[in-house]
Image (cartoon, rainbow, N blue to C red):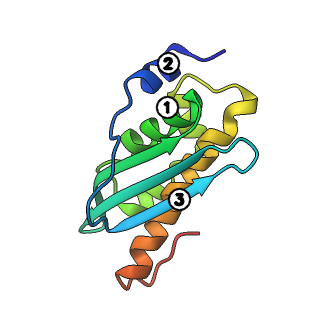
Amino acid sequence: MYSKKVIEYFENPVNVGKIENPDGVGRAGNPECGDTIELYIKVVDDRITDIKFKTFGCAAAVASSSMLTELVLGKKLDEALSVTKNDVADNLGGLPERKMHCSNMAEDALRLAIEDYRNNHGSKKAAD
């Protein structure tokens, strides 16, 4: 059902945890399955310099959260916003259709974290 990459990122996720005094926080969830993600970012010069997550959910949810953090760490905010749920799923070797909502949650949490950062730091550009 899951690719080797999904299992690897579920069993050994990277960037797990919480950032103390984050610059932005995004929370997303799926009421149907109960999965939730909290994503924390640190931003310096419009670039994500640290990113951590806490996910409560299935293997696909944890793997998607972990992969997303790897894909956007070090990127400028607008570059990070261009990373999509399909990028996350593709880098995991694919997700079953019924688990694609997990990559949606990760993308949503990132957008909300960047929006939170921009709202709290006076940026005129808000996330879509």
Residues 103 and 123: in front is 103
Tag 3 or tag 2, which sits nearer the N-term? 2
Residue position for label 1:
63
Task: Using the image, determine if residue 98 lies above or below residue 109.
Answer: above
Residue 28, horizontal then vertical, whole percent? 58, 56
User: Which badge, 2 or 1, comes first in the chain's sequence?
Assistant: 2
Name the residue nearer the viewer: 104 or 77: 104
Q: Is residue 125 left or right of residue 13?
A: right
Which numbered marker is on residue 111? none
Please report contact status of discs 2 and 1: CB closer than 8 Å, yes or no: yes
Q: Position of residue 45 (x, y in %)?
A: 24, 68
- Give the labeled residue for mark 2: 7
Give the amino acid at mark 1: Ala
Q: Which residue is at 32% across, 40% downward?
A: 15
Q: Residues within 10 Å of mark 1 (few under 14, many from 20)?
A: many
Please state which amino acid type lies under the numbered disc 3. Answer: Arg
- Residue 51 image point, x, y percent: 33, 51
Residue 119 on image: x %, y %:
44, 80
Label 3 neighbour load within 10 Å: few <14, some 14-19, many 20+? many
Amino acid carrying mark 2 in the image: Ile
Dot 2: within a 10 Å radius of its alpha carbon, few (fewer than 14), some, or many (20 or more) residues? some
- For the residue labelled by badge 2, is the local secondary structure a helix, a strand or a loop? helix
- The reply, left or right, for residue 101 in relation to residue 21 is right
Q: Quadrant of the N terminus?
A: top right
Q: Secondary structure at mark 1?
A: helix
Residue shown at 34% from the left, 34% from the top: 14
Tag 2 near tag 3, CB within 8 Å: no
* Residue 105 versus residue 21 in the image, above or below: above
Left or right position of 26 against 14: right
Point 49% across, 56% down: residue:
110
